[in-house]
Amino acid sequence: MVNRRDLIKLGLYGGTAGMLHLTRLDSGVLAWALDEVKGNAPSEWKPLAAVKPFTQALPLPPVIQPVNPSQLPGVQIIPGATYYEVRIRQGTAQLLPGMPTVIWGYQGMYLGPTFEARIGETTVVRQHNDLLVNMIIHHHGGHTPGISDGAALLSQRVQPGSFKDYIYPNDDDICATHWYHDHDLDFTGHNIFMGLQGCFFLHDAVEDQLNLPGSPRDPAPQGEMPFDLPLVLQDRIFDFNNQLSYNPFGHDGCIGDHFLVNGAIQPSVRVANRKYRLRFLNGSNARFYQPSLSNGMPFHMIGSDGGLLAASTDAESFLIGPAERYEAIVDFSKLKVGSHVYLNNCMAQTDGRRPDGLSTQCTNAHPGPDGVGSLLRFDVAFSAPDPSTFTPGQTLRTDIPDFRSRKPDVTREWLFERSNGAWQINGRFYDPNRIDARVKLNTTEVWVLRNGGGGWWHPIHIHRNQFQVLKRNDQFPGPLEQGLKDVFVLEAGDTVEVITFYNGNAQVGNYVMHCHNVEHEDMRMMMRWTVS
Ligand code: C2O
Ligand code: CU
């Protein structure tokens, strides 16, 4: 495959192909040009050893504050809706010692502000694109009308200097950990890498009644982290100038050698010796993680992509692929103030094809380029009362929609395969002008997702709905796939059958399904489908 070095040899870099990226990348390109002088071998990336782990405090993305709709000229007025205004712009972040890193972010922040809404509360977001490239903003996990879905379609592009009002009815079935990120056609990988991601949490009355850690009745002491804490896992590559170094020709999947949680490299976080609710989001382009706790404590798993599980289930560790979310209760109450617990990643991965497997060397060590080691340190630093209620194994909700008992109206099969150096679904590359499935409202469909082989792993994401897994390789799925999901990890050779009911009269129009290894997505492992 052609790489940048080949282009230079051919005299094309800075020519047609190069210019495409030179004009596009108003920030990253300087770093690439400098890289070229030094070469771009992994050994010449900025070594991780330059970072002293656990010296930075875990950041918490701020919750965005609403605005008065009168501040948004021309906005549609919807009774009961809450309005927000976001500017997508270039900024800087102090990610490494020394020179700040140029980033792209919602409100100019490396990880955008967190949205919170109640189920049934409409959220309207005016997104201004102050960058010099197109943007498409996708609410990942949301039950969103096609027009506001932000799929990779030309009609969805927000041009530089313009804005778009996104309307989210948030009429999802249950409270959940969603997120939002860029979804521009062909350029999602680069845009996400630059920082265009944020969290979007939905709450509801059942969640309130559960009285889980960090509920509104369980606020944290002044200056401490909330007891309901998001942990966004990312890997990134930096050059010697501390700049994010994205290889636009790395179509296998971008695997970084620096590990960030909530936008800080290997931070530490002060916690109390009590229970916390942790919301894990894998915000990496192509890396899979297997988080575990260094003292062997279990994660009491309570939620997956689409919300709370029916009952909590314990896990020593869990696999989390790109774009997946898992929620867990972690109980630090048996630990002494002054002790440390490390969040370790036990899954080795050195390229975009697939993880290399679980490591037995999964300790508190500095992760090598394979990612095995410590991502975050919990410092049990103070005591705090714990008015929350949670018992391992407890029932969480009895109102999760049961798609599995429905009789499907339609069954569709989708084969994910590598072809000609890029990626296909059912033998075809993504064409935003082609519709590959037409779904009718108020029908039940089974989608059979099949990995065509070659040893590649594909985390497949379907927009618009939450699904239940019927079968994974002809078996009933494991406990973590019992809940609602919108990303399905297809390991080598896997077949996963998922089912949903397409409800919601407002949720019509265009949607996509794609691999959430975003380099595979940009290299056309995507298909467009409609609901009418
Ligand atoms: Cu998280 Cu279509 O994306
Ligand atoms: Cu893939």
Image (spheres, rainbow, N blue to C red):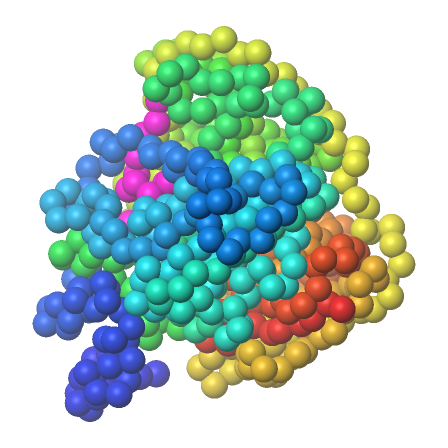
Residue 293 location in percent, x, y? 45, 31
Q: Is residue 516 left or right of residue 87?
A: right
Name the quadrant containing residue 397: top right
Q: Position of residue 172 (x, y in %)?
A: 69, 46
> Considering only vertical position in the picture, is 254 above or below 17?
above
263 is within the stretch colored magenta: yes
Say which residue appears at 34% left-offset and 83% top-offset.
1
Q: Is residue 439 left or right of residue 18?
A: right
Residue pictured at 46% horizontal, 50% vertical: 72
Q: Is residue 159 visible?
A: yes
* Residue that appears at 23% across and 67% down: 26
Q: Is the stretch drawn in magenta largely helix, strand or loop?
A: strand
Q: Which residues are magenta?
A: 256-270
Q: Find residue 216 and report its horizontal and vertical position in percent.
A: 55, 21
Up/down of 451 relative to 201, above or below: below
Image quarter (top left, top right, bottom left or bottom right) of the C terminus: bottom right
- The number of discs equals 0
514 in the magenta segment: no
Return the residue nearer the eye: 71 or 425.
71
Farthest residue, direction right: 407
